[in-house]
Image: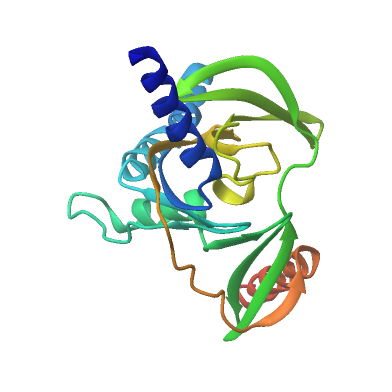
Amino acid sequence: MKKIAILILTLSLYNSFSQSKCGIIEYDFSIDSIVNIMEKKGISKPLLFMKNVNNAAEEIKLQLMFKNQTAVFKNINNMRPDNINKTYFNLAKMLACSNPLYYKKDSVQKKVSQNGKAYVVNGKIAPSNWIITKESKKIIGYNCIKATSKRIIKGKNLITTAWFAPSIKIPYGPNGYGGLPGVILELNLNATLYKATKIKFLKQVSIEPIGQGKQISEEEYSKLNTEQLNKFKEAIK
């Protein structure tokens, strides 16, 4: 009888987690891997700079708030500690998540400003070529499965590694990544690391709308940035 009661309790807890549609996941951010790569390769000139950025990154706290099939990923710690240089802190924030990212199904949006104009940049959840492996590990008590994705940029293979929790059926993760059959609790992206530290399931959450702005694609946004850079180069000639 006691075993049956434990089994019922376990199943009810599992069902409440797997069926929960609202919640908040908090993540830490690190660029330890970048610093380690520099040390191994003997790249000394920018090493101290990146170590300082990494120290600032330890103060960065990020949040994925989800509600049904929508979510927002953003920085939740905008208070710079007195012992952290402003430049390093702002750079760490930019590397972690420069603008809040709004998810809906397989799309992601962010709001940006250029020349005093507001734009809403429309893109897709990345990437679309996940390979799910048989490797697994526990992250904050949840069984997670490893998935990888490969991109080739300038002739180099870049591997993205995600660990997702199938029991939490939210197809999102940090920094615009998702598309897996479970929420991403750990993401290793270009030697930067996002790792979940806490999950809270809630009855309700409030996701603020992204706000007004001219709708543009990622390609159009990239073109805007290139034009701004070219104007800056011309101005300093």
Could you say where residue 14 lies in the image, as x and y percent from the top left? 48, 32
Does residue 112 appear in the picture of this structure?
yes
Identify the residue at horizontal 61%, vertical 84% (top origin): 212
**Which of the 4 image quadrants contains residue 77?**
bottom left
Identify the residue at horizontal 26%, vertical 57% (top origin): 80
So how many labels did they put on this image? 0
Quadrant of the snapshot with the C terminus = bottom right
Identify the residue at horizontal 51%, vertical 17% (top origin): 137
Does residue 31 appear in the picture of this structure?
no
Q: Nearer the viewer, residue 93 or 127?
A: 127
Q: Nearer the viewer, residue 161 or 50?
A: 161
Could you say where residue 41 lies in the image, as x and y percent from the top left? 53, 19
Quadrant of the snapshot with the N terminus = top left
Q: Is residue 204 left or right of residue 214?
A: left
Q: Is residue 172 left or right of residue 63?
A: right
Q: Is residue 178 left or right of residue 46?
A: right
Q: Is residue 222 above or below residue 59?
A: below
Q: Is residue 217 above or below residue 182?
A: below
Q: Is residue 195 above or below residue 218?
A: above
Identify the residue at horizontal 65%, vertical 65% (top origin): 109
Q: What colour scheme has been applied to the protein in the rendered image?
A: rainbow
